[in-house]
Image: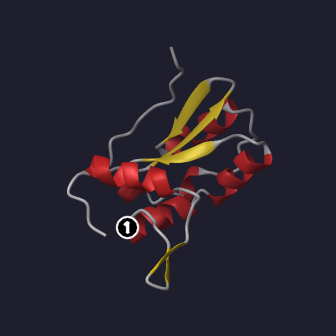
Amino acid sequence: MCFNLRFDKESFLQAVKGQTPYTFEENQLSFFQDLSRQTLQWRASFNGINSQLRAADIPYKWGYPRALIAEKDGHQSWLTSPSDTAAFQQSLGLTATQSAHHWDVANVAAFTLLRSTAPG
């Protein structure tokens, strides 16, 4: 499926989130975002941190282009740089267990780096 506007794609994906698979003409359909192999590999490098977040019941989501965003007690933390890994985990009350060498630094450097922010 091709969308001309990013907004249309985001709206569609939000509308069908958690409601797949759909049946169309006797075929089961599921909808997923189109992500590059590098982005999927980059996300896989966070498996240890994701496990910590799930175990602590801390909600998280993926940011675009490459960010892990988690929220605890009204504070939103963004992880976008290998050097921020320990600070990200500490800001959420997690033990720093994953070091920066797990990151694909060459790919990360190509993106704008965001920093941890608190609302308000």
Q: How is the image coloured?
A: secondary structure
Task: Report the side of 31 relative to 3 (left or right).
Answer: right
In-front residue for pair 62/88: 62
Residue type, numbered disc 1: Ser
- Residue 80 in percent (x, y) is at 46, 43
Residue at image coords 64%, 59% = 47
Q: Which residue is mark 1?
A: 36
How many numbered marks are there? 1
The single residue placed furthest to the bottom in the displayed view is 26
Q: For the N terminus, which image quadrant? A: bottom left
The single residue placed furthest to the top in the displayed view is 120
- Residue 59 in percent (x, y) is at 66, 41
In-front residue for pair 86/111: 111
Is residue 15 visible in the rendered image? The answer is: yes
Residue at image coords 52%, 59% = 43
The image quadrant of residue 93 is top right
Numbered disc 1: secondary structure: loop
- Residue 18 in percent (x, y) is at 59, 58
- Residue 11 in percent (x, y) is at 38, 48
In-front residue for pair 72/83: 72
The single residue placed furthest to the left in the displayed view is 4
Residue at image coords 30%, 51% = 8
In-front residue for pair 17/62: 17
Classify 35 as above or below 49. below
Is residue 65 visible in the rendered image? The answer is: no
Residue at image coords 46%, 50% = 14
- How crowded pointer 1 is (Cα within 10 Å; few <14, some 14-19, many 20+) is rated as few
Classify 65 as above or below 71. below
The single residue placed furthest to the front in the displayed view is 25
